[in-house]
Image (tube, grey):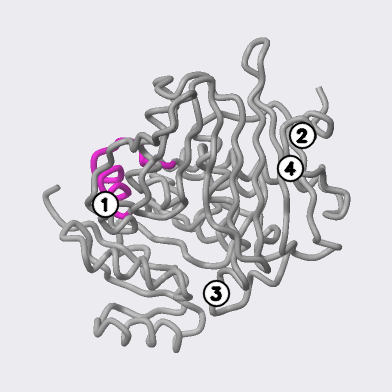
């Protein structure tokens, strides 16, 4: 890189704190502007870090002076902001999910493809060393044939953005599956590809769901992989991913420094797969990946088109959603009975 990559952040809520930290940590990036229709929020964010970027209520006023924009506004604003950037020839890194609907996702991607600008999406857990290594090991067949997996993540209250937009189904596109679960859905698609069938049970009752069970089937020739994922914003669930394969059991706690544990069949001893012990700031890794893609012409780690897959899958889940009290008990045989061929 011959110069620093100039960035503006559009949306100065809670998640913007992590993006400001990342920009300040990176010698490759220069944070030049904070944009929020509530200027006081932008001013408070700048004051928190003792910095003096330009503060603006309107994104249009900064587009001529930046290389890229981090869109950290509520989901229902992603489309208009991203297309505005594309029209000005400005690259974007959009907080996950890329948008609240497949229609909006497609419009964003098409606009940036037309303008030749990068559209990256902030599925930041992709940058964890353990998740990157899990992808490599699954794809290489290190664990044998995957037969079944289960994932869970839950907390009392969950993510609480400053604007409280997560309480508005129109603003988010959904409840816990979108706000919390989208990270795992993205990793699942990255690791296993698109499922051949899916199902969902939630407590939505017309609003954003706080609890949900999702089930998936991936057809692999004559055999299948069965998966399930539980998400909650009212119950604390130990965050973890467990996978059964033809050669044993794989466990990965959903935390930054967790090590992948592999217990081969017939062996009483867990074998830890080695990981890089260094825990870099994954938001810094993300912004530097974005800057490199924009300046080099290469692809970002998570492109808009790739991120759009999780939006489409989420829509399928909501279309096939049933009341939570009708959900099957956990277990592969019961999953077989509710996910139809």
Instruction: Tell me whether circle 3 and circle 1 mark residues in contact (CB < 8 Å).
Output: no
Residue 73: x, y in percent?
Answer: 52, 67
Mark count: 4
Magenta stretch: residue 301 in it? yes
Magenta extent: 287-302
Residue 173: x, y in percent?
Answer: 69, 58
- Indicate which disc, 3 or 1, sits on the residue closer to the N terminus: 3
> Is most of the magenta stretch helix, strand or loop?
helix
* Mark in the foreground, 3 or 2: 2
> Badge 3 is on which residue?
161
Mark on residue 335?
2
In the structure shown, which secondary structural element does the residue marked by tag 4 occupy?
loop
* Mark in the foreground, 3 or 4: 4
Separation of marks 2 and 4 at Cα, in angstroms: 7 Å
| Badge 4 density bin: few <14, some 14–19, many ≥20, Cα 10 Å | few
> Badge 1 is on which residue?
288
């Amino acid at each position: 890189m011959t110069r620093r990559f100039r960035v503006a952040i559009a949306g100065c809520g809670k998640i913007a704190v992590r993006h400001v930290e990342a920009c300040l940590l990176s010698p490759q990036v220069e944070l030049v502007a904070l944009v929020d229709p509530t200027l006081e929020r932008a001013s408070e964010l700048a004051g928190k870090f003792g910095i003096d970027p330009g503060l603006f209520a309107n994104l249009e006023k900064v587009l001529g002076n930046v290389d890229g924009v981090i869109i950290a506004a509520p989901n229902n604003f992603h489309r208009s902001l991203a297309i505005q950037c594309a029209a000005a020839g400005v690259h974007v890194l959009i907080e996950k999910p890329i948008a609240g609907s497949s229609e909006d996702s497609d419009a964003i991607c098409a606009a940036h493809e037309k303008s030749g600008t990068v559209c990256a999406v902030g599925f930041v857990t992709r940058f964890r060393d353990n998740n990157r290594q899990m992808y490599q090991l699954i794809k290489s067949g290190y664990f044998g044939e995957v037969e079944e997996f289960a994932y869970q993540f839950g907390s009392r209250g969950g993510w609480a953005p400053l604007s409280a937009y997560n309480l508005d189904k129109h603003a988010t596109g959904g409840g816990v599956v979108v706000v919390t679960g989208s990270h795992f859905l993205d990793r699942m698609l990255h690791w296993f590809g698109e499922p051949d069938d899916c199902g969902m049970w939630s407590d939505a009752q017309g609003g954003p769901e706080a609890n949900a069970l999702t089930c998936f089937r991936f057809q692999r020739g004559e055999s299948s992989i069965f998966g399930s994922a539980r998400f909650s914003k009212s119950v604390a669930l130990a965050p973890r991913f467990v996978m059964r394969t033809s050669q044993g059991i794989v466990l990965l706690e959903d935390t930054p420094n967790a090590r992948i544990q592999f217990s081969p069949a017939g062996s009483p001893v867990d074998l830890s797969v080695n990981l890089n012990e260094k825990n870099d700031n994954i938001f810094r890794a993300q912004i530097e990946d974005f800057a490199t893609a924009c300046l080099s012409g290469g692809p970002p780690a998570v492109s808009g088109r790739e991120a759009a897959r999780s939006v489409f899958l989420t829509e399928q889940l909501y279309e096939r959603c049933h009341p939570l009290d009708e959900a099957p008990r956990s277990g592969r045989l019961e999953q077989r009975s509710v996910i139809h061929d």
